Amino acid sequence: MDSKRKKKSLRVAIVASLFHEPVTRRLVQGAHAALLGRGVRRREIETFWVPGAFEIPPMVQRIARRRARRVDAIVAVGCIVKGETDHHEHLASAVIDHLLAIARSSEIPVGLGVVTVRNSAQALARAGGARGNRGADGALAALEMVAALARAGR
């Protein structure tokens, strides 16, 4: 490759839940910072907001299927907090299972930045607090998968 040619910037979509917005906004900020830190241009990052975690997979699937505006990776960001029932367990399983199925069928890396926690303190700790930022972790994992797929001859 000619050393004077610019390296192509990756296009990344972030799909984020508005539910538990104080947490998810921090997760999105972490994902943005991680992507920018790895050389993704700001204009190549697009964020799509959906009502809740349940709505993340359909939006990820829509983005993965779009051909006119192809993306190289998608980062899913959300927060599922345990309530009084087992609803959170079913929701988390459904969201994660569907994200995996989309990544597998589309061969577009989907970084997981969805936190599943018992309370708001745990959520904030994982959204830039003492436990790091799972949005950033999901973004970095997606970028690593882009590189791994390229090495494998995507």
Image (cartoon, rainbow, N blue to C red):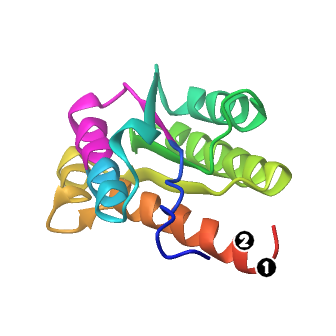
- Looking at the image, can residue 138 be seen? yes
Residue 149's disc is 2
Within 10 Å of disc 2 (Cα), the crowding (few <14, some 14-19, many 20+) is: some
- Looking at the image, can residue 84 be seen? no
Image location of residue 146, percent across then percent down: 62, 65
- Tag 2–tag 1 contact (CB < 8 Å): yes
- The residue located at (76%, 46%) in the rendering is 102
Image location of residue 80, percent across then percent down: 42, 42
55 or 116: nearer the viewer: 55
Residue at image mark 1: 152
Question: Which residue in the rendered view is the most extreme toward the bottom?
Answer: 151
Question: Which residue in the rendered view is the most extreme toward the top?
Answer: 51
- Whether the magenta-drawn stretch holds residue 47 is answered as no
Number of on-image labels: 2
* Mark 2 residue element: helix
Q: Amino acid at mark 2?
A: Leu
Q: Which span is picked out in magenta?
A: 13-29
- The residue located at (25%, 40%) in the rendering is 23
